Image (cartoon, rainbow, N blue to C red):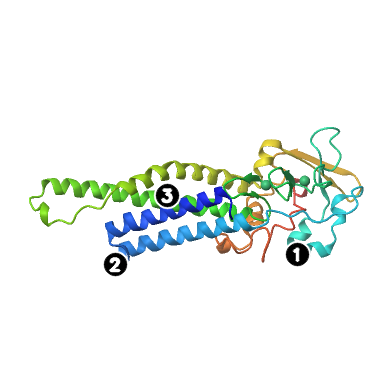
């Protein structure tokens, strides 16, 4: 949590929250003294709180520890016994018992992937992060703004961080623009009024203007990232896979192998894709600390085995 970028994000959050509450809603709508002010303050506080909780989970959760594996010469997934999958949902386990091996895209294209830095087998969708100096299960990318990798363990938290931050920023922009329009009207009325001395002074707009200048690029940047990750969740891809593509091989019961090569090898349908990341229970999709890849009610499995198009 002591990373400079994490502190900068927290500072931006705190600045935004203080300006919107103290310099916009309080002087404009009377804060908690009026129903309208109370509604806006509570809604904005709720959105910001959910964004912050999602952010804290993304920063602090392990993005995907690779389980220990012995015997590099044998089938990689054979080495994982039931004990290591004990907390995996039974339905998902049944779907993923077939042995899938992600293979190298270069060279002869048949060897299972191996990390030369960790000196260990790389399960499907796992990648080595140079910043973290380790392999990460279902690695999406290393994010400097969370000072952590985004992977199997914190993908849901990261996605909800983008979701709630986008909502918070758009809501803050809506309040700022409404406030600005109201101030302009009041200013015009003051100029034409013959009772200027009896009117309350207009609130200062210096800090709200600063907030607006910060909010506009921020909301566009975070909003675009949220749209991108919504597409990734819907198609069950990671950022790395969209650029590199994936090549998987499956051993059939007959002993023969089937293979597929595509950037969307793990795309097994919209519902299965979404529930594998956000959880099986739709009302809990929006709760960052419940379900998700690792945790109670997990539907995504152990991060080592994933259903593929070869299973459809
Ligand atoms: Zn590695
Ligand atoms: Zn990393």
Q: Is mark 2 within 8 Å of ligand 2?
A: no
**Secondary structure at numbered mark 3:** helix
First in sequence: mark 1 vs mark 3 = 1
Horizontally, residue 37 falls left or right of residue 193, namely right
| Relative image position of residue 282 (x, y in whole percent) | 58, 61
**Secondary structure at numbered mark 2:** helix
| Relative image position of residue 61 (x, y in whole percent) | 65, 58
Q: Residues within 10 Å of mark 2 (few under 14, many from 20)?
A: few
Q: Residue furthest top?
A: 107
First in sequence: mark 3 vs mark 2 = 2
Which residue is depicted at the point 11% across and 57% down?
198
Residue occupied by mark 2: 33
Residue nearest the observer in this picture, 78 or 172: 172
Residue occupied by mark 3: 170
| Relative image position of residue 32 (x, y in whole percent) | 32, 66
Please identify, in this view, whether the residue under mark 3 or under mark 2 is nearer the observer: 2
Q: Is mark 1 within 8 Å of ligand 1?
A: no
- Corner quadrant of residue 299: bottom right
Residue nearest the observer in this picture, 206 or 261: 206
How far apart in space, not on screen, are marks 3 and 2 (Cα)?
24 Å
Residue occupied by mark 1: 90
């Amino acid at each position: 949590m002591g990373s400079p970028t994490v502190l900068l994000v927290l500072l931006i959050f705190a600045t935004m929250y203080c300006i919107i509450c103290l310099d916009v809603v309080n002087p404009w709508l009377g804060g908690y003294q009026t129903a309208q002010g109370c509604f806006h303050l509570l809604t904005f506080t709720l959105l910001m709180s959910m964004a912050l909780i999602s952010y804290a989970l993304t920063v602090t959760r392990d993005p995907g520890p690779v389980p220990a594996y012995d015997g590099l010469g044998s089938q990689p997934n054979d080495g994982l016994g039931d004990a290591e999958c004990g907390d995996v949902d039974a339905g998902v386990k049944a779907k993923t018992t077939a042995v899938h091996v992600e293979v190298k895209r270069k060279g002869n294209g048949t060897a299972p992937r191996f990390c030369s830095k960790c000196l260990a087998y790389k399960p499907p969708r796992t990648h080595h992060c140079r910043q973290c100096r380790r392999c990460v299960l279902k690695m999406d990318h290393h994010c400097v703004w969370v000072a952590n990798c985004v992977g199997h363990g914190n993908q849901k938290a990261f996605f909800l961080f983008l979701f709630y931050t986008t909502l918070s920023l758009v809501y803050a922009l809506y309040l700022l623009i409404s406030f600005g329009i109201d101030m302009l009207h009041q200013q015009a009325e003051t100029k034409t009024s013959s009772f200027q001395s009896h009117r309350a002074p207009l609130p200062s707009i210096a800090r709200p203007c600063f907030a607006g200048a910060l909010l506009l690029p921020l909301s566009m940047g975070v909003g675009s990232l949220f749209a991108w990750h919504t597409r990734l969740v819907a198609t069950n891809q990671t950022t790395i896979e969209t650029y590199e593509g994936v090549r998987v091989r499956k051993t059939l019961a007959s002993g023969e192998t089937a293979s597929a090569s595509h950037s969307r090898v793990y795309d097994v349908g919209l519902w299965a894709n979404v529930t594998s990341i956000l959880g099986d229970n739709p009302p809990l999709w929006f709760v960052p600390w419940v379900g998700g890849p690792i945790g109670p009610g997990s539907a995504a499995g152990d991060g080592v085995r994933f259903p593929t198009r070869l299973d459809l």
